[in-house]
Image (cartoon, rainbow, N blue to C red):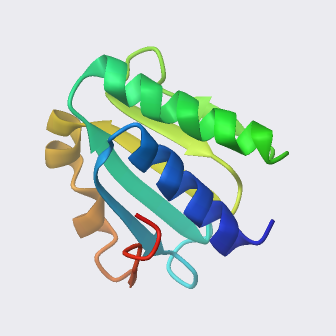
Amino acid sequence: MQEREILTLVAKAADDKRAEDVIALNMQGVSLVADYFVICHGNSDKQVQAIAREIKEKAHENELNVKRIEGLEEARWVLVDLGDVVAHIFHKDERDYYKLERLWGDAPHVDLSEVL
């Protein structure tokens, strides 16, 4: 799968579990960690966990390697690492606190309107 297809898969999986304010940042040339970040939030611990599990499940269905998942138990900030695409699933309060979009403000936003 190409990285844009993985990006689409992650965004759709998050949207399927009613993630809020799903955005994607093009990190190419900005960070060595990944080519794309997907950032979203849920309104409860259970929803944050459900979003992360849905992303993991869709990745496995498409034979993608999930390199790691961090923060699932606490469900405040869950990171799902798919290599070229990293999903950051926040609890609403944590997203407001960390403001990753602002931290990576020089990264261009990817238009997800056709996907979501």
Question: Left of 95 or right of it: where is 23?
Answer: right
- Tell me if residue 27 comes above or below residue 76 in the rendering: below
Residue visible at 50% across and 54% down in the picture: 12
The answer, for residue 21, to whether it is visible in the render is yes
Residue 74 falls in which quadrant of the image? top left
Point out residue 91 in the picture as x, y percentages from the top left corner: 26, 33
Among all residues in the image, which is located at the extreme top? 73
- Tell me if residue 47 comes above or below residue 3 in the rendering: above
The answer, for residue 33, to whether it is visible in the render is no
Q: How many marks?
A: 0
Residue visible at 34% across and 70% down in the picture: 104
- Tell me if residue 50 comes above or below residue 40 in the rendering: above
Question: Left of 91 or right of it: where is 25?
Answer: right
Point out residue 64 in the picture as x, y percentages from the top left corner: 80, 48
Point out residue 37 in the picture as x, y percentages from the top left corner: 49, 62
Residue visible at 61% across and 72% down in the picture: 35
Residue 48 falls in which quadrant of the image? top left
Point out residue 46 in the picture as x, y percentages from the top left corner: 34, 18
Quadrant into which the C terminus falls: bottom left
Among all residues in the image, which is located at the extreme right? 63
Quadrant into which the N terminus falls: bottom right
Using the image as rendered, state which of residue 54 and residue 33 is in the foreground.
54
